[in-house]
Image (cartoon, helix red, strand yellow):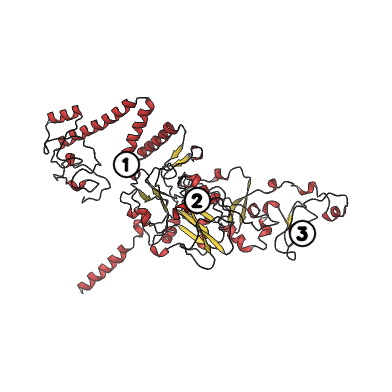
Amino acid sequence: MTELRILLGFAIFLCLCSCKHTEGEYHSLNDKIEEEGKKYHGTNISSETYIGDIETLEITEGGHTFLIPERKGQLKSYACTECHSKPLSEMQNNANAQRAHWDIKVVHADENAMNCATCHNGNAMDHLKSLTGNAVDFNRSYKLCSQCHTTQFEDWKGGAHGKNIGGWSEPRAAMTCVNCHNPHQPQIESKWPVQFNTQKVKERE
Amino acid sequence: MSEKKKWFTLDLGFNKKVPTASSCGCGKTSGGCGSHEAPSPSKNEHAMTAEEFDKAVEGTMVDETRKDGFQQVFDVKMDRRTAFRKLTASLLVGAGAVQTSCSVIAGEESKEKAQIDWEEQFKGNYKLMTQEERDATVDRLVRSYQLRKKENIKMSATDASKNVLFGYAFNISKCQGYMDCVSACVEENNQDRNSQMQYIRIHEMKDGEGFKFNEADDNYYHEVPAEGHFYMGTQCFHCDDPPCVDVCPVQATWREEDGLVVIDYDWCIGCRYCMAACPYDGRRFNWSKPEVPEEEVNKNQHYLGNRMRKKGVMEKCTFCIQRSRAGKDPACVEACPTGARIFGNLLDPDSTIRWVLANKKVFRLKEDLGTEPKFWYFMD
């Protein structure tokens, strides 16, 4: 009987000692992240200065709040109504009018899915337009992209798609869709690598 | 040594134990190892009289002896008094050496250079340094650069912050093989231009064949992305249980509290054990003196990061410690035009890296080794 008790006691002792949680060691990295993340109270490191001169605006989408670059100030000919003083239909009918935006070619989905009017409202050029006809600010153009590109939108909000700006700490700033993709031709063209290691070639000869 | 000490201590006779010859760091038991200069030669092995001591100090001696190297000093029975005398003598000899070497060249600057070199030569392991000692070595390195190159650098020795554990994620579907990251890394971290050392490798792999690093091309030069290929980058993965750290015989590399695996370039002996131990080809060795054109030197440096290295030491990616500890993204993250590189704090539940780990199907290389790399791959 006493032997059994000693054995039991030893077993309990083993159970208590075998787990190293109290010593700050974990079974796996995931355990460590989870456990130490519970005590997380923020850091005193700020990434604010690394955003630089970019004008930003704060957006909140699906529980994620972060900064994106301001867009309207970057558009060469905004506000559009400086030229588009009349609805588009009236301007197009004028034979003497200058042709503008001749250089813009839409290579985005196909003609059945998209044309200029999918995103632009000929009667209110200062705003973009959603599929249902609601006005969308140029600064929040991601709302248009996300109508079709839903998975990319989810990834972008979480941080898996798109480029982070500045630093890893708070405040989070990220590029918005149009900072990388030309909305009229969103496909990014292939290019040459920026470097070639000639020494590596020699070493491997 | 029976106690697990990280440093060598002179037995001053308190323990009444006779120090053995094998206590030298070089492990040689006969003859001189050359790692210790003979501070006081004495024909009498076992004791030293005051007269002999004085004579030795006066003449700064160089006498023929039967035993040389450390044995002269350590392989003798001595009392505390003699030990202190011997130590004083060796210090005087050392100081004398500095004095003479300086006075020959003359000039304040060269004297200062010699003084800095002397102190740098005999500084300890960075891990064991106090904050004052760390600041002092940083100051010395900055001053040394100023004296030699007439340029000012900014060097920090910022410690790991609490509540920070750095992690990295790499999107295989987004990487297009532009190699902007590789170039940015070289420029940021002052890597040797002659040997074109690079911490990052971008592997061009065939679609549908899985990860075959032996068949992948990591030095392509054609328009990218190439048809039917995908790209994945490797660098130091900053393992949480790094095998490179375990094998280092001199503890010149270690994992910091924020998860960065770093190297003390001044403590590294260049044995390359770590290079052999790393299962990810994450470490690089300086076979020659690293050369960087003065105008290309990144002057924003960190002691454990991108400060100038020397010949015969290891180096590797530090997640740009000089940037990341200040809150900035590593150079590769900043340079990547595709957003394939994601960097952040693993302990912050709201960080983007945590979102990726929780919401994307992530994996790591050679997970079965148990090295716990803090570098994940994922796909869209």
Side of B5 relative to A122 (left or right): left
* Tag 3 subunit: A
The residue that label 1 is drawn on is: B124
The x and y percentages for residue A97 are: 85, 49
Question: Label 3 to label 1, Cα distance in Å?
Answer: 70 Å
Spot occupied by residue A55 in the image (x, y as percentages of width and height) = 63, 45
Q: Residues within 10 Å of mark 3 (few under 14, many from 20)?
A: few
Spatial separation of the CA atoms under disc 2 and disc 3? 50 Å
Residue A169 showing in the rendered view: no
- The answer to whether residue A26 is seen in the rendering is yes
Name the residue rendered at 50%, 53% in the picture.
B344
Q: Is residue A20 left or right of residue B26?
A: right
Residue in view at x 57 percent, y 56 percent = B222
**The furthest residue to the bottom:** A1
Q: Nearer the viewer, residue B118 or B124?
A: B118
In the picture of the structure, the residue carrying the numbered disc 2 is A198
Identify the residue position indicated by label 3 in the image: A117
Q: Position of residue B19 (x, y in %)?
A: 16, 45
Q: Secondary structure at mark 1?
A: loop
The secondary structure type at the circle numbered 2 is: helix
User: What's the chain of the residue with tag 2?
Assistant: A
Circle nearer the N terminus (2, 3): 3
Distance CA(mark 1)–CA(mark 2): 39 Å
What type is the residue that disc 2 sits on?
Thr
Looking at the figure, which quarter contains the N terminus of chain A? bottom left
